[in-house]
Image (cartoon, rainbow, N blue to C red):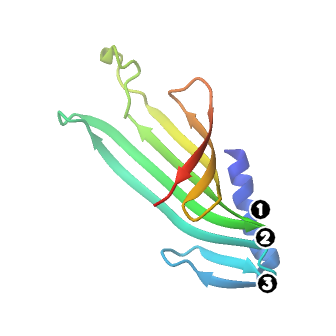
């Protein structure tokens, strides 16, 4: 998480430092500006940045707490194109402390976070490296895979 904060700070600082030499435009679907260096070798292009809040209920109508969801998908160029995807679900009173013994009550807070780096290979095919961090796993999980976009 600290590395993500550092990345966001570095991109913000680059925008301030390089600002006069880039072409600013407003993202189509939001307020985060995209930018590209005059050489075309560096750039930042927001795709989707969303925050959602949910009240959760199970199928029987029982209260299953609340969820704050953050989704941030942005493309960037550092000599070649990549996209960085951040998804986080932060839940309060959502999951049971022990799903097999519900008398133990609910967890006060749990979370699920995905950090993904995606390298497009063709228009439909990409390589994906992903890190999953979750309270229901003892250790973080690294995933390496292929993505087909259509």
SS assignment at label 2: helix
Residue 122 located left or right of residue 88: right
Looking at the figure, which quarter contains the N terminus?
Answer: top right
Give the residue pinned by disc 3: 38
Q: Which residue lies furthest to the left in this view?
A: 60
The earlier-in-sequence mark between 2 and 3 is 2
Q: Distance between the residues labelled 2 and 3?
A: 14 Å
Q: How many marks?
A: 3
Residue placed most toward the observer, 39 or 5: 39
- Between the residue at mark 3 and the residue at mark 1, the CA separation in whole angstroms equals 19 Å
Q: Tags 1 and 2 in contact by the CB under 8 Å rule?
A: yes
Q: Which mark is residue 10?
A: 1
Disc 3 vs disc 1: which is toward the camera? 3
- Quarter in which the C terminus is drawn: bottom left
Point 69% across, 59% down: residue: 8
Above or below: residue 110 compared with residue 51: above
Task: Name the residue tied to disc 2.
Answer: 14
The span from disc 1 to disc 2 (Cα, nearest Å) is 6 Å
User: Does residue 60 appear to the left or right of 42 in the view shown?
Assistant: left
Q: In this view, does 27 lie above or below 149?
A: below
Please tell me how crowded label 2 is: few (under 14), some (14-19), or many (20+) other residues with Cα within 10 Å.
few
Quarter residue 18 falls in: bottom right
Which circle marks residue 2 in the picture? none
Above or below, 53 against 113 in this view is below
Q: Which residue is drawn at 38% across and 30% down?
A: 95
């Amino acid at each position: 998480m600290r590395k993500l904060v550092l990345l966001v700070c570095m991109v913000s600082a680059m925008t301030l430092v390089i600002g006069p030499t880039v072409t600013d435009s407003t993202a189509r679907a939001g307020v985060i500006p995209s930018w590209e260096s005059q050489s075309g070798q560096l750039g930042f292009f927001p795709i989707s940045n969303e925050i959602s809040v949910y009240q959760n209920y199970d199928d029987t109508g029982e209260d299953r707490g609340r969820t704050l969801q953050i989704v941030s998908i942005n493309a960037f160029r550092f000599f070649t194109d990549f996209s960085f995807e951040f998804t986080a679900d932060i839940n309060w009173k959502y999951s049971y402390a022990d799903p097999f013994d519900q008398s133990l009550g609910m967890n006060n807070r749990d979370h699920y976070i995905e950090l993904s780096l995606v390298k497009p290979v063709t228009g439909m095919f990409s390589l994906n490296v992903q890190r999953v961090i979750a309270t229901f796993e003892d250790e973080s999980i690294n995933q390496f895979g292929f993505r087909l976009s259509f």
